[in-house]
Amino acid sequence: MDEKISRLINMAVSQINAGMVIIDSDRNIIFWNRFMQIHSGIAEGDIEGKNLFELFPDLKGSGIEKKIDSVFLLKNLAFTSWEYRPYLFKFANTHSVIGAEEWMQQDCTFSPLIDEAGTVTHICLSVFDSTNTATYQNKLLRASSSLIKQRNKLATINQKLEEAQNQLLQSEKMAAVGQLAAGVAHEINNPVGYVNSNISTLESYLDELMQMLAAYEACEPALDESSELTKAMMLTKETIDLDYLKEDLVNLIKESKEGLDRVKKILQDLKDFSHVDESDWQFSDLHKGLDSTLNVVSNEIKYKAEVVKHYGDIPEIKCLSSQINQVFMNLLVNAAHAIESHGTITITTNIEGEGISIAIEDTGSGIPEDKLPRIFEPFFTTKPVGSGTGLGLSLSYNIIHKHDGKITVKSEPGKGTKFQVWLPHNPPEQPIQ
Amino acid sequence: MMQIKEQFNEDRRDALQEVVNIAMGQAGDSLAKLFSTFVELSIPKFHLCDVTELNQELSKNAAYAEKITILRQPFSGQLRGEGIAIFNNNGVSELANLMGYEGEVTSNNEREMLLDVCSILIGACLNGVTSQLEIALSYTAPTIISQNTTVNEFFNPESIQWRYAMIMEIRLTLEQYDFKSNVLLFLSEDSFPPLIDKLDQMLEEI
């Protein structure tokens, strides 16, 4: 080659802004360009003939020996990347004033130098400064990981919002049902009122009529039996079966009054249950709430289970009674649904600590152990599609929580489930939803 | 496609197979020396396929059904393409020790080691071919393109720019280490004419 070009190439190798190291087959360094001298502080004269691994002991046992072996054996290229190995040679950062990386980040390539016979005699190691790229890349990584964190946080918040919204919806639905019930109760109350009053009047009139009839009957022996009028009267008396009629009339009135009493009771229960007129925190009797709820849901329960009450001597507690009744209703309906053919629902109330405990226990199918931790989750339901919203227990949980109370569950598949609610006697008032 | 298939007639295919077999023999020898263990290299299989069929083609291989790590090394010059190395995730830390990473093997060590092995395998496969056919190639540093993925997730036709690719499939097994790797060499369409020329030259010399 032209001597001039050869001199230029030497100059270029010396001046190129990348490290260049030539290693012989004994892994001794035989060349070390200006870039390497400047960054390592080791002059070319001081490295000549020295072993790469003796000069840089950190490189031992880190896979570099095999990389070099592979280049000698297979004539392929070997690489290191700053991403997985920040540097091969520990050089001070080139971006010393404004920079985040402490050491120069390097991308390195091991290339084979092959003689005419096709044998690899030396290896050329080139070292490129990738500090700038690495700094930006690392910044980007940090930024994107913080973005991911924020996104996950937002997703959690969104989910919570959605749950809250659904519970609100359910709670509003319940309130609307309550209001409707109260409205219907109010509307029915009036006609039932005058029917009731009329029946009472009717009863007293009837009583008087009976007295009158008795007086007429007392006259019967004095009548002329052969008279046509008397014959007609006796025939009528026989045809209408007066004796039975007298007896039955009394019964009919009595039964009608009983029926009206039941209607009045149901109306009162509906009012008590919905508590439209008392949606504030008030001291109330839980037994009354339980009983009115039992009446409201009696249709769901009466063919399924016998209700056994073990009511203790408990004081009134401060609560939002309409909401507490909703909880009772959910628990009672769930208990009835859990019973396949016929069973028992036991309600027990007691004083416990600074509050009251209410246990509702059924002899139903129970909840499998793996599902137990999830039953208070919104939308979790074991009922067939369409029959449960999966919100009842979640709503109950929140209501009890709002009362500073506790709701716990114990269940044994095949034997039954026991929900235990504990409510404090006088909890701090929380805003009504 | 038909045209390209016709260009790769039986003579040319046989010639390429021969070249590749010799290359693999040499590579197997060198790899055994490097790893100091018995290395089993399969006889390379060729597929010439449309990219849309690639997925289907690759899915036939049961080895690609599991979760895998995919690396690639581009090469350019008279032949242009990318070498794709697929590793199953077994025996990686043992292999790292075999490759001279001592002590506790970090995930970065493992990744660098897989890159080393990718470069070694692709280099070993291609160097043997290029030296026989006197083709000059240059290589770019390999990169990990996907970890814990499946072939179906990775090779979708939208992500591949070439319409046709010649795929050379080589399987490497290190028996002692339960380590398996498949190397796919993708040649771009525009690499076919120079490759055919070189094969014809070789056929004439015989």
Image (spheres, grey):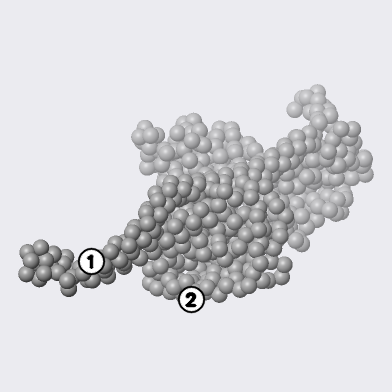
Image position, residue B26 (x, y; %): 57, 52
> Which residue is painted at 51% across and 61% down in the image?
A292
- From this view, report whether residue B112 is shown above or below residue A91: below
- From this view, report whether residue B109 is shown above or below residue A83: below
Q: Residues within 10 Å of mark 2 (few under 14, many from 20)?
A: few
> Which residue is painted at 55% across and 52% down in the image?
A275
Q: Secondary structure at mark 1?
A: helix
> Which residue is painted at 52% across and 73% down in the image?
A309
Q: Quadrant of the N terminus of chain A?
A: top right
Which three-letter amino acid code belongs to the residue tagged 1? Answer: Tyr
Looking at the image, which is closer to me, A79 or A202? Answer: A202
Looking at the image, which is closer to me, A342 or B123? Answer: A342
Quarter of image, res A249:
bottom left
Q: Which residue is mark 2?
A: A415
Which three-letter amino acid code belongs to the residue tagged 2? Answer: Lys
The first of marks 2 and 1 along the sequence is: 1
Image position, residue B86 (x, y; %): 55, 50
Q: Which mark is residue A296?
A: none
Image position, residue B68 (x, y; %): 56, 53
Question: Whole-Å distance between the Cαs marked 2 and 1?
Answer: 67 Å
Q: Residue furthest top?
A: A4
| Residue A353 visible, this angle | yes
Q: Which residue is mark 1?
A: A216
**Chain that bears disc 2:** A
**Chain that bears disc 1:** A
- On the picture, is A31 further left or further right than B47? right
- From this view, report whether residue A231 is shown above or below residue B21: below
Looking at the image, which is closer to me, A248 or A411? Answer: A248
